[in-house]
Image: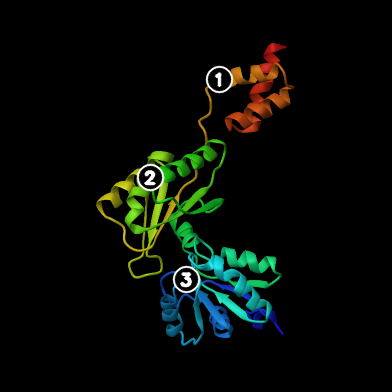
Amino acid sequence: MDDDAASPLPPSGGLTLVATPIGNLDDIPARALQALRGADTVLCEDTRVTAKLLARHGVAARLAALHDHNEEAEAAPLVKRMLAGEKLALVSDAGTPLMSDPGYRLVRAAIAAGVAVTGIPGPNAAVLALTLSGLPPHPFLFLGFLPARGGPREAELGRLRAAETAGLSATLLFYEAPHRAAETLAALRDALGADRPAALARELTKRFEEVRRGTLAELAAHYEAHPARGEVVLVVGPAPPPDAPAEETLDALLRRAMETLSLRDAAAHVAAATGMPRKQVYARALEIGKGAG
């Protein structure tokens, strides 16, 4: 059988993760519909949401709820059913399962039990927002939802800022509820810098799709005055490179390092500490070394 014609379901019992539309119900691959039709049971966050999608495409399937409140208790019985030969499909209300949605505990339990786990790729709001943002597409770091309360959120952003100070440079992706978008943008502005480039994408693939780009300060001000509606993804550009130290400071760092290290090792050490290009630091170390000679 050709690979293109292969069934999207495991040959015996197993689990298939099926990505579903993030807004436009027509954004679903043919293989996803085939997998949903062939599953003994489709596990979903909200059976009403998934029933609407299946009705749109004429798919008849048995539905069962799997969400944050019952996943831990349901994982073992579901694994037992798959070991007995049942084929289960897992969907979230929108997008790719497990991406800030339930399913991780079930997947881990299935893998641990030797159950076949496969997936049908498809829509993902975070990746679509990233590609539309105009910000560097890689590397990126998906962080899901920040804590809703101010204290834990500030602590999480403090850890993120510390990672950036230590060298992390990546475009950041967050999911957020529309009623917290302005508050979260203000927290990001305060933690990461008012001039940091960013974008807010909402209602992706829907009629009122919007991608607004600007600095964190500009976006925070806009959505404070005009509250966001619909599903929201926040995209924040990577941290700017650290400021190069003044030449006197660089010289002082190099001279101090060269007291105990070879010229090459001293240059490597100072380059790592300052974030400056190693070749530039090494060239300056050579100049200092020649002057000392």
- Label at residue 249: 1
- Label at residue 107: none
Disc 3 marks a residue whose amino acid type is Glu
Instruction: Tell me the quarter of the picture where residue 13 sits.
Output: bottom right
Quarter occupied by the N terminus? bottom right
In the depicted structure, whether residue 227 falls above or below residue 272: below
Q: CA distance from mark 1 to mark 2?
A: 38 Å
Instruction: Tell me the quarter of the picture where residue 115 sits.
Output: bottom right
Q: Earlier in the sequence, mark 3 or mark 1?
A: 3
- Label at residue 150: 2
Local SS, label 2: helix
Q: Residue at x 70, y 16 (%)?
A: 259
Q: Residues within 10 Å of mark 3 (few under 14, many from 20)?
A: many
Q: Position of residue 135 (x, y in %)?
A: 47, 51
| Side of 157 relative to 182 (left or right) | right
Q: Earlier in the sequence, mark 1 or mark 2?
A: 2
Q: CA distance from mark 2 to mark 3?
A: 28 Å
Q: Position of residue 4 (x, y in %)?
A: 65, 80
Instruction: Tell me the quarter of the picture where residue 205 sits.
Output: bottom left
* Front one among 218 and 59: 59
Q: Residue at x 65, y 75 (%)?
A: 80
Local SS, label 1: helix
| Side of 78 relative to 46 (left or right) | right
- Identify the residue under disc 3: 45
Q: Residues within 10 Å of mark 2 (few under 14, many from 20)?
A: few
Q: Residues within 10 Å of mark 1 (few under 14, many from 20)?
A: few
Q: Nearer the viewer, mark 3 or mark 1?
A: 3
